[in-house]
Image: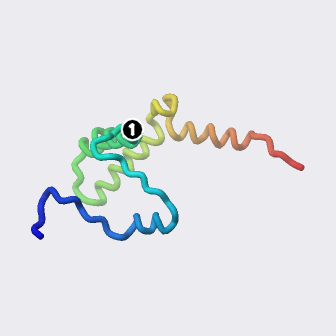
């Protein structure tokens, strides 16, 4: 059989098999249907536009440093419309505050 650029890649028996062995259901997006998971599509677009397209990576270490700096900015200082224009850190602090102030039931 001759290799072709248009053949589907084969998947090894790694993570999917382990997922099925542990009764985890894998749900793949349909090709060409970005609306199946708009959150990851939005993230991928932001990551591509603001990080990958904005930097030259000179080495693996350089790439890791630049990507980590972008991730920190994305999660710490940047408001997200899906979170009511709050940063993920702000939402996390609100959740912690609610957990600390919720009444504890004692019997």
Residue furthest toward the right? 107
Image: 2 above or below 73: below
Instruction: State the count of labels.
Output: 1
Residue 87 position within the rendered picture, expressed as x and y whole percent measured from the top left: 50, 36
Q: Quadrant of residue 2?
A: bottom left
Identify residue for label 1: 38
- Give the residue displayed 46% in from the left and 64% down from the top: 19
Image: 43 above or below 63: above
Residue 24 position within the rendered picture, expressed as x and y whole percent measured from the top left: 49, 60
Residue 71 position within the rendered picture, expressed as x and y whole percent measured from the top left: 40, 46
- Give the residue displayed 31% in from the left and 39% down from the top: 45
Image: 8 above or below 29: below
Residue 62 position within the rendered picture, expressed as x and y whole percent measured from the top left: 29, 55
- Give the residue displayed 47% in from the left and 33% down from the top: 82
Q: Of helix, strand and loop, which one carries label 1?
A: helix
Dot 1: few (<14), some (14–19), or many (≥20) neighbours within 10 Å?
Answer: few
Residue furthest toward the left? 2
24 relative to 8 in the view: left or right:
right
Residues 105 and 18: in front is 18
Q: Quadrant of residue 80?
A: top left
Indicate the quadrant containing the N terminus: top left, top right, bottom left or bottom right.
Answer: bottom left
Residues 23 and 88: in front is 23
61 relative to 82 in the view: left or right:
left
- Give the residue displayed 74% in from the left and 39% down from the top: 101
């Amino acid at each position: 059989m001759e290799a072709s650029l248009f053949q589907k890649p084969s998947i090894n028996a790694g993570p999917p098999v382990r997922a099925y062995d542990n009764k985890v259901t894998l749900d793949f997006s349909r090709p060409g249907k970005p609306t199946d998971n708009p959150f990851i599509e939005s993230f991928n677009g932001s990551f591509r536009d603001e990080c990958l397209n904005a930097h030259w990576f000179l080495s693996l270490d350089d790439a890791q440093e630049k990507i980590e700096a972008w991730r920190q900015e994305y999660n710490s200082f940047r408001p997200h419309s899906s979170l009511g224009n709050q940063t993920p850190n702000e939402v996390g602090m609100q959740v912690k505050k609610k957990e600390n102030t919720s009444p504890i039931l004692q019997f």
